[in-house]
Each structure stands twice: as C-alpha cells, then as structure tokens.
Amino acid sequence: MSRAGTLPTAVVDLAMRLGVRPAAHSPCVSLTQTGHMRRSLQSDSWMALKAFQTIATDRCAFDWRAKVGPFGLISGRDALQDGAGRFDITALGVIPLARAQHTPALVRGELMRYLAEIAWAPQAILDNPELRWRVDGPDTLSVSAGIGATASEVILGLDSDGRITTAFAPDRPRSATPPILPTPWHGRFSDYRLVDTIWLPMAAEVAWSLGAKEIVYWRCQVKSWHADVRKADRDRSKRNEMTGTP
C-alpha cells in the first residue's frame, strides 16, 4: 500500500515526476539488459553480457542473472532475497567458479545496489516500507534501509528535470569478507524514456573510486522493462472497463 502521506513532499514529488501513481500497485518489475563489464578492476579487457533482472517494489529484494563472455558460457547471479545477499559465478551453468560468503558486508553491498536501482523500480518510492528517506537539498535525496551491521545508505542526485541521474555511496563494501574494503561507489543513469507511463533511464554505468582514480567497471542498456501489476488491480481495471466506471 502506498505510503505517500507519510513521506517528505520532495520524495513524493520525485515519484510523481517519474510517472508513479499511488493507486497503481506493482510489487515487482522486470527488465532485460545488454552491456559490458571489466574482467577485473586491474584489467582493460571488457566482456559482453546479457542479463535479466527482477526488482521488488514492496520490499528490498532483487535477482539479477547474467550470461557473460563468449557464447555466454559464464553465468553470474547477484541477488538480495529474504534479507540475504547472494553472488555466484558458474561456468556452463553448473561448474562453480566463485561464491560470496553470506556476511553482513555482502548484505550491505546488495542493499546499496537495490537503493541505487530505484531509478528502475520507482514504484518502490511509494510502496516499499523498508525505505527511509531524507531530503539533503533541492536536487539531492538520501535513501537508506537495513539496521545494525547491514544499515546502508545511498545518495541520489537529480538532474534539471528532477529525475535520478546519480547514485553514490561513500563506503560500499568492495569485498564480502575481511578486509571489507569500504570504497566510494558511483552509479550514473541517462537516456530517460517513457515506458508504460513510467520515466526510466535506459542507460547506466557503475564505478569504484580507487584513490584519485575512478574506474568504471559495468555499463548497460535496458532493452525491455515491465511492471507486474497485482491481479486485483488487473481484475478491477477489467471490471471498470466492462462497466464503464472510471
């Protein structure tokens, strides 16, 4: 259920500008992406990727699955589900290459990703009760989630149209195990387009700041986006259409 009446006016205004309406409930959005990612932060070599992602709008959860490299032989999964983080890499879909340990640092990192990617699931602005918002200025909002060791915050910057254009965390864990390596982390969104009444950025990139150097390690383009509407809303719309009720 929408929390519009309990949120700062600037936060509700952001949701409205992006096309979100309090009466429209979509507990999940799905999107597909194509792009490239570095083999490592020390490498100048990039790998092509194709990904499918779901993002919950009524809780902090997402599931990103990608095929990477030649012929998509490497599979990656990055997820936050039921409060637990997950990061796995496999070859041929079955041979494990890497798996992150389940630690508070992993959860923090995944929470920060979720908070940054609200640009792709703006319904969460009104519908996710786990989010805490703070207005830092006319074009800056902070959003946080989690408690204790998993408490996480991301600073969102708005462009001249009042849409999310940057996401920043000064201390995202770069490792899920000691040493945790809290590191400045940046996300940038661009190429906003109207999709199913929602304004969405169709391009994005992510970077780490290592000393004085910023290293972009992931870029993508959104190829499709879909909001999964609750069955009750679909049934009500169908009923209203049949009866002529607005």
Image (spheres, rainbow, N blue to C red):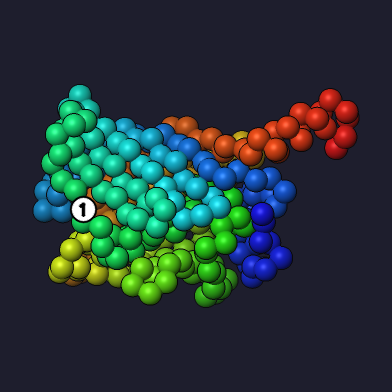
Depicted 162 relative to depicted 50: above or below: below
Q: Residue at x 29, y 65 (%)?
A: 104
Write the residue at 38% across / 61% down: 112
Q: Amino acid at mark 1?
A: Ala
Identified at 46% across, 66% down, the residue is: 145
Q: Nearer the viewer, residue 142 or 132?
A: 132
Q: How many marks?
A: 1
Q: Position of residue 149 (x, y in %)?
A: 33, 72
Instruction: Note whether 173 is above or below 36 in the view shown.
Output: below
Q: Nearer the viewer, residue 186 or 31?
A: 31
Question: Would residue 166 be seen by someone viewing this image from the given angle?
Answer: no
Instruction: Answer few, some or many: residues within 10 Å of disc 1's Cα (few below 14, many 20 plus, some between 14 and 19).
Output: some
Measuring 46% from the left and 55% from the top, which residue is drawn there?
60
Q: Secondary structure at mark 1?
A: loop
Closest to the observer: 214 or 8? Answer: 8
Question: Viewed as shown, does residue 187 lie left or right of 59?
Answer: left
Residue picked out by circle 1: 100
Q: Is residue 11 above or below residue 33?
A: below
Give the side of residue 119 with respect to residue 11, left or right: left
